[in-house]
Image (cartoon, grey):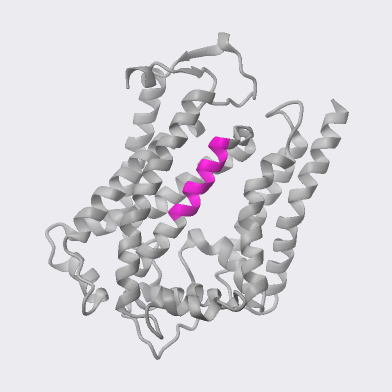
Amino acid sequence: MKKSFMIKTPSNIYIWWNIGSSIMLMMTIQILTGIMLSMNYMNKNNPFNSSMNLYLNMNYGWVIRLMHSNMTSIMFIAMFIHMTRGLMYKSFFMMKMWMSGMTMLLLMMMESFVGYSLVWNQMSYWAMMVITNFMSAIPIMGNKMIKIIWGNFNINIILINRFLSIHFIIPMIIFLMSMIHLMILHKSKSNNPMGLMNKMDMIKLNPIFIIKDMTLMMIIMMMLMNINLINPFMFSNSDSFVMMNYFKTPSHIEPEWYFMFFYSILRSINNKLSGLMMLIMSIISFMIIPKMNMNKFQSFNPLYKTMMLMMINSIILMSILSTKPVEYPFKEINIIMILTFFSLIPLMKLMNKLWNKLI
């Protein structure tokens, strides 16, 4: 532990390099609040009433429930900023660290989806229906796999029990992955805005960066408490307060905001298998970006940063368009943004070759 605090760190890193430690704190809080909520969660008869019971009858249940729910959104905001910083300053050259981080992000998305399903409201039920039905696109085995996952011929309490078990298992894997991520970081050292590693410019992690970490953690906790007390349902959909109804499909199915980018890809293509393949390709795209960006200078590359800003803008626009009806002009604009996103990956390779020739 003492060696961890004394590790040498570049002196010119700033607040974007402090977000990782805040994510660790939020993950710890999520585990603790999740354990407290699970002690009062009953999914035998009506999980929706059980989740409402946490608000109404459990001592300080509303505080714990809101903290657990809203912390998820804040945690994803922090993770996306952390990932964006890695992309902008090319932290992905440390491939093992980048891949472990991407694995944790995917596990976090899986964890949040199964947790969201446990509430058993109208939106979560139909989100489960949409996502699990994409398994039917898999040739030959698709329909059989759906029945195995559901445990029946439709979504019911059996699936909720399975999701509850998965919701407990995944955090253990994420925690293990975060330890591996941290070990790789300590072995390879942090990068910095200049992209240059100079031993003369290294200082000890403690006390300067520890104080910065703690300051950011306090700011995040104050933000969370402000959201919980002033606008506790700012991240929630109106159908989140309606009990699941087998016979009434919501007029517009809208996932949590951190799934909107992927949802926009799925719903833009009418064919299930094609949509699923495009979704997988979008995930792979982030993993192969390091292979597209091998250049002489790690951080100073205006052409690359321009392309990366274009990619970020396309992701944001796709997320916004996923909240709109599937009709003209939203569908057409969304398809253009998807094509832009996928075309930027090979363009980055070309821009890096051009930049290497210029310098």
Q: Is 162 in front, or is 3?
A: 162
In the depicted structure, whether residue 229 falls above or below residue 138:
above
State the quadrant of the N terminus: top left
Residue 105 lies within the magenta run: yes
Tell me where residue 355 appears, x and y as whole percent: 82, 33
Q: Is residue 152 left or right of residue 280?
A: left
Residue at coordinates 87% horizontally, 29% vertically from top-left? 358
In the depicted structure, whether residue 140 falls above or below residue 162:
below
In the depicted structure, whether residue 335 falls above or below residue 310:
below
Residue at coordinates 47% horizontally, 68% vertically from top-left? 255
Q: Quadrant of residue 228?
A: bottom left
Over which residues does the magenta segment extend?
Answer: 96-108
Q: Is residue 118 visible?
A: no
In the depicted structure, whether residue 23 falls above or below residue 273:
above
Q: Quadrant of residue 176?
A: top left
How many marks the image carries: the answer is: 0
Q: Is 210 in front, or is 323?
A: 210
Tell me where residue 166 appears, x and y as whole percent: 35, 61
**Residue that extends furthest to the right in the rendered view of this protein:** 357
Residue at coordinates 29% horizontally, 46% vertically from top-left? 29
Q: Main secondary structure of the magenta part?
A: helix
Q: Is residue 206 left or right of residue 333?
A: left
Q: Is residue 150 left or right of residue 161?
A: right
Residue at coordinates 58% horizontally, 42% vertically from top-left? 84
Q: Is residue 353 left or right of residue 219?
A: right
**Residue that extends furthest to the bottom in the rendered view of this protein:** 247
Tell me where residue 144 appears, x and y as whole percent: 49, 79
